[in-house]
Amino acid sequence: MKKISVIFGTRPEAIKLAPVILELKKYPESFDCKVCVTAQHRQMLDQVLEIFEIEPDVDLNLMVKDQTLTEFTAKAISAIDKYLKDEKPDMVIVQGDTTTVFCAALTAFYNKIPVAHVEAGLRTGNIYAPWPEEINRVLTSKLTTIHFSPTKQSRINLIKEGINLTDTHITGNTVIDALLIAIEKVKNNPPEIPDLPDNNLDSFNGNQIVLITGHRRENFGIGFDSICNAIAKLAEKFPEVHFIYPVHLNPNVQDPVNRILNNKKYNNIHLIKPLAYLPFVALMNRADIILTDSGGVQEEAPSLGKPVLVMREVTERPEGLLSGTIKLVGTDEEKIITETSKLIMNVKNSNDIPNKYNPYGDGKASDRIVKILLEHYHFDN
């Protein structure tokens, strides 16, 4: 039996690793699966763990309000190093591109412990977009032993960087595994959505809903002002359409959103608190159009048949562009208005919107990952 430590710290990591953890636990004779969290996102992380009924074995609890990336990185490397020396796992599994991912991979390398990277090979080619995620995933790839790529393109990216073909595997994205689990939970027990009329979606009576999410650091400042100005003008242009925006807690997001959009004249703009995972899935499932800068939403929405406008200049998920499930609009005010208007006027009868085709996965990625570990790897240091 091999001891595997799954290390993560944010809500997206928890969502994408939960199905892997649940799958590993189906093989107790082969794997001793340990869960270590840094709590880079404290409250949002805990909500996801509760949904998937995952109890961390170790909680490093590293998040402190307003700490810098440098401060968090220093603390994380030190804390994870102590954890690995105490736990002595045969392998570390990480996911994605957060600072927790890079710190865990680097510290595992220092301790000569193999690293398996879930969602490996995503690239924009610009180390400052997204920032710091692009450099986190590039550096993590250099420290990784087993690369689980979600798509053919992400595997190609790794091969171009000199990663051995035999160390890479195309699995699909585990976020789809998690989404399918969540959709069943939502169908069986529709969640409340705080801050909406009557705390649910029934009050919108079939009116179109545009769901908005935004949190990327590279959009802070002028970018977010432009996004908010576009939403305000769209709300005036389409008074029968409801714009629902769960507003990220970061002050760099809160300030422009409240300054520009928190106005009583926009009675069809609903600024709500950040949502737990299940209410967000329910809202995403009900929405007609999604405006986002989130990577996870780009991957999830196609499974729900939702058109997505991505408020970024580049994306590390080109498969959505090629399949037509997403379109880049950046933070250009006029482009956001133009492309959203087109969808609002045509979303009900457009033949251009893919019908639940998802280039990112089929819900079986976690099963593939665990079978690869069972069949091919013995974790020899």
Image (cartoon, helix red, strand yellow):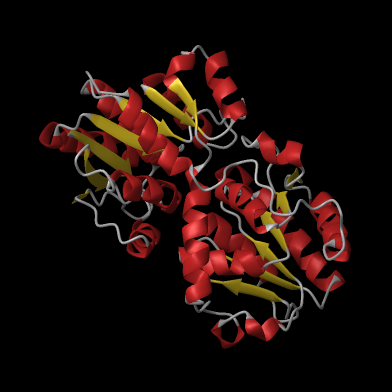
Residue 15 appears in view: yes
Name of the residue lying farthest toward the bottom = 198
* Position in image of residue 229 (x %, y %): 75, 61
Residue 378, percent from left and from top: 25, 23
Toward which corner of the image does residue 118 lie, by quadrant?
top left
13 vs 43: above or below = above
How far from the left and from the top, in percent, is residue 337? 83, 57
Of residue 220 and residue 234, the one placed in the foreground of this image is: 234
Q: Which residue is drawn at 65% across and 58% down?
A: 304
Residue 70 is at least partly visible in this image: no
| Residue at point 37%, 57% (across, down) | 45
Residue toward you, 323 or 308:
323
Q: Please tell me which residue is depicted at 59% across the width and 52% down the height of the picture.
A: 300
**Left of 343 or right of it: where is 374?**
left
User: Which quarter of the image is occupied by the C terminus?
Assistant: top left
> Viewed as shown, does residue 201 lie left or right of 266?
left
Q: In this view, does 46 lie above or below 297?
A: below
